[in-house]
Image (cartoon, grey):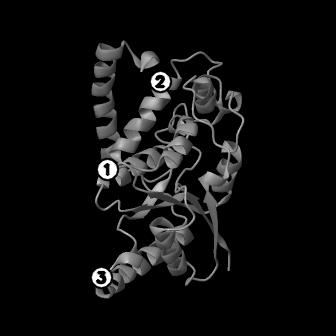
Amino acid sequence: METKKIVAIIGSPKKTGQTIDQLRAFENCLEEHDGIEIENLFLSDYNLKECLGCNLCFDRGEEHCPLHDDRDFLLSKMLDANAVIWVSPIYAMHISHLMKKYLDRLAYQCHRPAFQSKKAFLLVVKGDQFQPSIKYLHTILESWGFDCVGSLGSASIATMPEKVRQMKMKQMKKLAASFVAQITEKKKKSPSLMELLNFKMWQTRAMTKDPENRDYRYFVESNLVKKDYFYDTKTSKAKLYLSSLVFQLLKIYIKREMGGFENA
């Protein structure tokens, strides 16, 4: 049986407490299935500097970033895995500062996503009380190409009354089984209307740039200039037609508000 490698990116600055209790419980559910290998990566263990906002990663390429830290090591771990679990506590009604810093360091992925249909699971402790935190993670990771196939946002089961804990454990086991099934299937999802629009926007914007621009080179070198999406997938003609129609309206708006895609 092929081993399924899962990496957990952990945004908690602590290695004990509710977030880790919840993660361990979920990982125990995953490990009930054969062929699961999990590696926990605590962001607090790595050197991650704060983004300077210089735009070099966007314009010239991520290899030109002036910050030399552990970003690329962590990136390689995710690329090598079959799936990624994103783990964060709630601080000040949002994800932790460590998680946000890591997301900022990989912001160029919104333009040039490398995780096409790689499966992701979101585990945000107390995210049920602050749903925007889960929605934010979902939006960012989908723009990087991830297929977010599940999320868990409740408080730590370790602090729950026994009856509630048992109910939550059943839910967690179902989520874990679904996550493993999604990883095993390896099927690339059909893009949504919004994902088709986002692709068309980045594609059009890239082609307005100088040929030395990294986004321009990405679309040319990846043979994406005349594609409908990042990868070949079954998409209905109706959805493609609707996305094209909405995109034409979007072009009018962007030209009026920003002067064109080159300024977007």
Q: Nearer the viewer, mark 1 or mark 3?
A: 3
For badge 3, the amino acid type reads: Val
Residue 236 in view, yes or no: no
Figure quadrant of residue 253:
top left
Residue 190 in view, yes or no: yes
Q: Which residue is mark 2?
A: 205
For badge 2, the amino acid type reads: Arg
Q: Nearer the viewer, mark 2 or mark 1?
A: 1
Residue 164 circle label: 3
Q: Nearer the viewer, residue 216 or 130?
A: 130
Q: Quadrant of the N terminus?
A: bottom right
Q: Name above or below for residue 253 compared with residue 92.
A: above
Q: CA distance from mark 2 to mark 1?
A: 28 Å
For badge 1, the amino acid type reads: Pro
Relative to residue 224, is residue 256 drawn left or right? left
Q: Which residue is mark 1?
A: 132
Point out the residue furthest to the top here: 259
Q: CA distance from mark 1 to mark 3?
A: 24 Å
Q: Nearer the viewer, residue 22 or 5?
A: 22
Q: Residues within 10 Å of mark 1 (few under 14, many from 20)?
A: some
- Residue sitting at 48 percent across and 42 percent down? 229
Q: Secondary structure at mark 1?
A: helix
Q: Name above or below for residue 31 compared with residue 76.
A: below
Q: Residues within 10 Å of mark 3 (few under 14, many from 20)?
A: few
